[in-house]
Image (cartoon, helix red, strand yellow):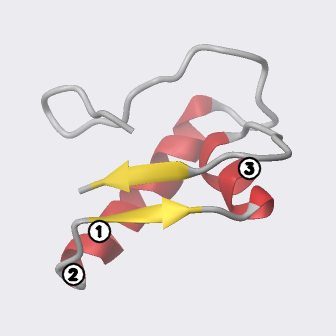
């Protein structure tokens, strides 16, 4: 997910999500903190439950790359 300047999470347009955008932004922010703490370049999220958790999109397939 590409972040706008200032470090805020990008808002992704698309279908309705089960939570408000701030909920997903907080989840991504906590993930980014953990990735930086472990000195990782990013995370590849493959599981459907995890993709739903971080994006709010209920998809049957796909990958989510979170870049630090």
Q: Check the image and name the residue furthest to the bottom.
A: 38
Q: Is residue 36 above or below residue 42?
A: below
The residue where tag 1 is placed is 33
The residue where tag 3 is placed is 52
Residue 32, percent from left and from top: 32, 62
Q: Are marks 2 and 1 in contact (CB under 8 Å)?
A: yes
Residue located 14% across and 33% down the image: 6
Residue located 27% across and 33% down the image: 3
Q: Which quadrant, please, contains the C terminus?
A: bottom left
Give the Cα separation between the discs numbered 3 and 2: 24 Å
Of marks 3 and 2, which one's residue comes earlier in the chain? 2
The residue where tag 2 is placed is 37
Residue located 79% across and 61% down the image: 49
Give the Cα separation between the discs numbered 1 and 3: 19 Å
Query: How dense is the environment of label 1, judged by Cα within 10 Å: few (below 14), some, or many (20 and up)?
Result: few
Of marks 1 and 3, which one's residue comes earlier in the chain? 1
């Amino acid at each position: 997910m590409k972040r706008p300047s200032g470090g805020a999470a990008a808002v992704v347009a698309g279908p309705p999500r089960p939570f408000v955008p701030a909920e997903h932004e907080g989840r991504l922010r906590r993930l980014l903190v953990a990735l930086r703490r472990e000195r990782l370049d990013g995370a590849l999220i493959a599981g459907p439950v995890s993709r739903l958790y971080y994006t709010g999109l209920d998809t049957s397939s796909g990958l989510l790359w979170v870049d630090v």
